[in-house]
C-alpha cells in the first residue's frame, strides 16, 4: 500500500481546481446538448461523474510531466491547457480541432507541446506508451513523470498486467490512475472480475497501490500528487484505484437502462462537483457569488468555443493523404 | 512524386546497381561479413553514432546477446542501460517503445522470431502506425523480425508475415537480401522518423557472406536494386528468394536466356518505378516470395504491372509463393510448401516460352 502523501491544495489551488471541474461539467453538458440537437458528429462520451478524477490527477502533474488520458478525462486535457474551443472543434471534425478532423471525440487529442499523448480505442494501449515515456525520462535522467488513465474494463486485459509488471521491473516513474466506474460498457464489475478491488492487481505485480474516493477531488489530488512525487524521487511506479460511477451511458447513444436506478440515485448524491462546492462554501473559500461567477465564466468560454468550432472550416479533402508519415 | 495512370503515386527514383554483394569487385568497398554480422555491425554503428538509440527485446542483453546473438557484445560495449532485456511481454514492450520514441529515443526492438510479432500487434498497427496521421506524434522505432524458413523450424519459427504490415498505413517495411543492404537498410530504418519493420532473413544469417562498407553506410528506404541485368524476363523478389532467383537465372544463362532480377529491398514504400522500368524492358514478369502467395506482396506487384505496364507485357504475370497452409516442419513437406530455385526455373521456362 501507498502511504498517504499529506499533499494538500492551497485555497488558491482549490479555487483553480473548482474552475477546471466546473469547466469540464459545462463543456460536457454543452457537448451532450449539441449531440441531442443533432449538431454533433459520430459518438461522444460523457464525463459526468469523472470530473474529480480527471481534474484532480491532472492537476497533480508538473508542466514537464507527460500524461496519456482517455475518453473520460476531458478535465485532464483542459487542465493541461487544451482549450474548449479546440476540443469542440475536434469533436465536430473541423480543421481547427486538435487533430484537424483525423480522429473522433477525445481520441487522438494528442499534443506534445502540452505533453499530452493521444489515445487509441484499444485501451489500455496508453499504458505501455506512458511507461515507455517514463523509461525515456529515466534513460535521460530527467526528473519527469508519466501518468496514464485506464478503466475497470481495461484492467482485465493482459496488457494492463504486462505493463504494471514491466514498470515494476524498471522502477519507472509511472502513475496509473484506474477509474473504476463499475461498468465496462454494459458489463458490471462482478461479471468482469472475481476480486473486490482492482488495486489488488497492482499489488500482484509489485506496484504499490491505493484505493481512493474518486468523487472527492481533494482525495484524488492528494493521492496523485503523492504518487507523482514518489515517482519523481525514484520511488517507482504506483497505482491509484479511484472508485466512482459512470453517470451516463457508455457513449451518447447508450441509455444505460442496464444500470439499476438505485445505484445511480446513490451516486447522484455523491456528485463530485456539488460535493466540492459544498466544501468550498463550508470552508469559506468561495461564497455563492464566487461560485456563480465561475459558472458564468465557464458558460461564456464554452459558448465562445461552440461558436469557434461551428464557424470553423471543414478539413480540405485534398489533404486526406497527408501526414501518414513523419517527414 | 510523379502520377501514374491510375492515380497511385509512383516513386520517381530508380537505382540500377550491379553489385549489391553479388560481384567480387565489390569486396574492395569493405570487409567480408556474414549477413548476421552485418546486422550487428549496423546496430553497433548507429548506437555509436546516436545516444538515443537503444536496444530492447527478449534475451538481447547481458553476455547472451539474443537468440541468434545479433546483439552479443552490445551490452558490454554500450552498457546495460542501452541494451534492455524484456520480460515475455511483446505487447507491453513494443508499446513502451512507442512511448520512448514519442519522447525522442530511437528504440530498436528485437522480436525473437517474426512469428511472435502477432503478440505485439495492437501496439504496432493501432498505436504506432496511426499516431502521426492522427495527431502528429512521431514514432521512430525499428522492429527487427528474424523471419523466413527453409531451416526445418516448423509453423512458429518460419513465418513471413510482412503482408500484414504492408497493408497497414503508417508503417514502413524492409527486407534486405545482402550483408551490405542488411547494414545500410538497418541504419536508414533507425534514422527514419517512422515505425519501420525490418525483416531479416534467418536462412541467410550465416550462409551468406559479402562485402560490407565500414562505418557509416545507408541504403535509402523505398529504393529497389536491379541485381542482375537481363532482357528476356524479370524476376521481382526480396530476402532469401533473391538468391534462389539468381541461381535459376544462372542456369538459364547457359541456355542463352537472360533474366533480370530486381531486389525490392523495401516493401513499403514500394519502388514501383524500378519494377515497372524492368518489366517494360523485358515484357515478362515473375514475382517470387517465400511468404504465402495468397494476398501477398506479389499480388500487389502483379496488379501494379497489370495496371501500369500492361501494354509492354508479352506474357501473363506469374507469381510463386508459399502455399496457403501453415509452414510445415518435415523436409519433404516444407520443400513442397516453399519456393526454391528449381520451382523458379520451371516457372521462368514457362514464362519465356509463352
Image: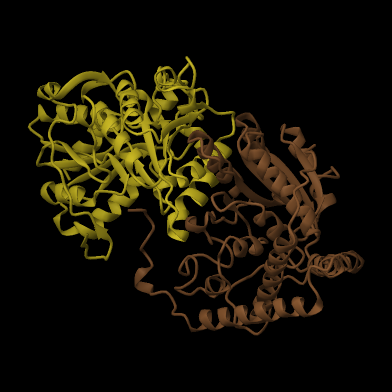
Q: Residue furthest top?
A: B63
Query: For this view, does A320 lie left or right of residue A15?
Result: left
Q: How many marks?
A: 0
Q: Residue at x 31, y 24 (%)?
A: B41
- Write down the quadrant of residue A22 in the picture: bottom right
Q: How is the image coloured?
A: by chain
- Write down the quadrant of residue B198 in the picture: top left
Q: Nearer the viewer, residue B86 or B146?
A: B86
Q: Nearer the viewer, residue B304 or A50?
A: A50
Q: Residue furthest left?
A: B256
Query: For this view, does B11 lie left or right of residue B76?
Result: left
Query: For this view, does A189 lie left or right of residue B197?
Result: right
Chain B: give its colour: yellow
Chain shown in brown = A
Q: Residue at x 59, y 51 (%)?
A: A62
Q: Nearer the viewer, residue A10 or B126?
A: A10
Does any portion of residue B80 appear in the rendered image?
yes
Report x, y in % for residue A145: 59, 44
Q: Residue at x 61, y 82 (%)?
A: A303
Report x, y in % for residue B89: 59, 34
Report x, y in % for residue A264: 86, 67
Amino acid at each position: 500500500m501507498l502511504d498517504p502523501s499529506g499533499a494538500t491544495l492551497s485555497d488558491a489551488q482549490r479555487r483553480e481546481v473548482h474552475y477546471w471541474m466546473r469547466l469540464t461539467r459545462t463543456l460536457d453538458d454543452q457537448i451532450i446538448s449539441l449531440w441531442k440537437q443533432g449538431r454533433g458528429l459520430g459518438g461522444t462520451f460523457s464525463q459526468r461523474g469523472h470530473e474529480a478524477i480527471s481534474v484532480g490527477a491532472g492537476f497533480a502533474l508538473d508542466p514537464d510531466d507527460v500524461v496519456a488520458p482517455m475518453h473520460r478525462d476531458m478535465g485532464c486535457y483542459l487542465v493541461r491547457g487544451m482549450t474548449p474551443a479546440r476540443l469542440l472543434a475536434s469533436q465536430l471534425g473541423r480543421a481547427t480541432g486538435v487533430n484537424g478532423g483525423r480522429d473522433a471525440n477525445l481520441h487522438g487529442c494528442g499534443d506534445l507541446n502540452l505533453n499530452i499523448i493521444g489515445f487509441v480505442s484499444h485501451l489500455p494501449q496508453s499504458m505501455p506508451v506512458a511507461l515507455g515515456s517514463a523509461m525515456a525520462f529515466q534513460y535521460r535522467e530527467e526528473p519527469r513523470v508519466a501518468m496514464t488513465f485506464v478503466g475497470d474494463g481495461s484492467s482485465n486485459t493482459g496488457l494492463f498486467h504486462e505493463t504494471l509488471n514491466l514498470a515494476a521491473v524498471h522502477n519507472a516513474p509511472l502513475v496509473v490512475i484506474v477509474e473504476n466506474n463499475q461498468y465496462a460498457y454494459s458489463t458490471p464489475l462482478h461479471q468482469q472480475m472475481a476480486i473486490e478491488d482492482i488495486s489488488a492487481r497492482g499489488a500482484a505485480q509489485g506496484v504499490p497501490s491505493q484505493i481512493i474516493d474518486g468523487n472527492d477531488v481533494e482525495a484524488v489530488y492528494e493521492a496523485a500528487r503523492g504518487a507523482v512525487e514518489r515517482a519523481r524521487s525514484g520511488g517507482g511506479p504506483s497505482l491509484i484505484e479511484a472508485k466512482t460511477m459512470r453517470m451516463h451511458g457508455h457513449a451518447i447513444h447508450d441509455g444505460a437502462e442496464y444500470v439499476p436506478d438505485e445505484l445511480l440515485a446513490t451516486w447522484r448524491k455523491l456528485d463530485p462537483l456539488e460535493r466540492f462546492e459544498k466544501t468550498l462554501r463550508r470552508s469559506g473559500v468561495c461564497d455563492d457569488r464566487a461560485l456563480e461567477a465561475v459558472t458564468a465564466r465557464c458558460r461564456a468560454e464554452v459558448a465562445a468555443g461552440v461558436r469557434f468550432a461551428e464557424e470553423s472550416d471543414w478539413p480540405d479533402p485534398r489533404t486526406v493523404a497527408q501526414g501518414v508519415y513523419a517527414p | 512524386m510523379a502520377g501514374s495512370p491510375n492515380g497511385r503515386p509512383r516513386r520517381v527514383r530508380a537505382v540500377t546497381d550491379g553489385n549489391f554483394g553479388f560481384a567480387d569487385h565489390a569486396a574492395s568497398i569493405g570487409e567480408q561479413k556474414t549477413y548476421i554480422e552485418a546486422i550487428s555491425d549496423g546496430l553497433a554503428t548507429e548506437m555509436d553514432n546516436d545516444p538515443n538509440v537503444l536496444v530492447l527485446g527478449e534475451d538481447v542483453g547481458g553476455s547472451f546477446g539474443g537468440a541468434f546473438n545479433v546483439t552479443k557484445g552490445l551490452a558490454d560495449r554500450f552498457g546495460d542501460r542501452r541494451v534492455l532485456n524484456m520480460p515475455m511481454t511483446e505487447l507491453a514492450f513494443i508499446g513502451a517503445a512507442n512511448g520512448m520514441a514519442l519522447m525522442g529515443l530511437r528504440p530498436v526492438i528485437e522480436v525473437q522470431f517474426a512469428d511472435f510479432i502477432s503478440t505485439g500487434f495492437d501496439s504496432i498497427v493501432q498505436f504506432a502506425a496511426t499516431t502521426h496521421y492522427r495527431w502528429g506524434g512521431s514514432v521512430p522505432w525499428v522492429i527487427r523480425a528474424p523471419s523466413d524458413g527453409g531451416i526445418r523450424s516448423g509453423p512458429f519459427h518460419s513465418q513471413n508475415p510482412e503482408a500484414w504490415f504492408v497493408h497497414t498505413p503508417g508503417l514502413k517495411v524492409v527486407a534486405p537480401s545482402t550483408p551490405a543492404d542488411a547494414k545500410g537498410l538497418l541504419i536508414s530504418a533507425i534514422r527514419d522518423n517512422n515505425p519501420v519493420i525490418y525483416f531479416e532473413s534467418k536462412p541467410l544469417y550465416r550462409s551468406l557472406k559479402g562485402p560490407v562498407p565500414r562505418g557509416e553506410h545507408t541504403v535509402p528506404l523505398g529504393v529497389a536494386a536491379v541485381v542482375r541485368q537481363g532482357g528476356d524476363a524479370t524476376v521481382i523478389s526480396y530476402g532469401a528468394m533473391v538468391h534462389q532467383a539468381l541461381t535459376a537465372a544462372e542456369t538459364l544463362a547457359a541456355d542463352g536466356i537472360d533474366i533480370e532480377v530486381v531486389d525490392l529491398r523495401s516493401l513499403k514504400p514500394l519502388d514501383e518505378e524500378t519494377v515497372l522500368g524492368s518489366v517494360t524492358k523485358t515484357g515478362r514478369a515473375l514475382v517470387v516470395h517465400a511468404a504465402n502467395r495468397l494476398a501477398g506482396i506479389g499480388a500487389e506487384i502483379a496488379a501494379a504491372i497489370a495496371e501500369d505496364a500492361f501494354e509492354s507485357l508479352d506474357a501473363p504475370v506469374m507469381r510463386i509463393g508459399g502455399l496457403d497452409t501453415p509452414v510445415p516442419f518435415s523436409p519433404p513437406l516444407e520443400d513442397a510448401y516453399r519456393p526454391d530455385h528449381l520451382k523458379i526455373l520451371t516457372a521462368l521456362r514457362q514464362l519465356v516460352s509463352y
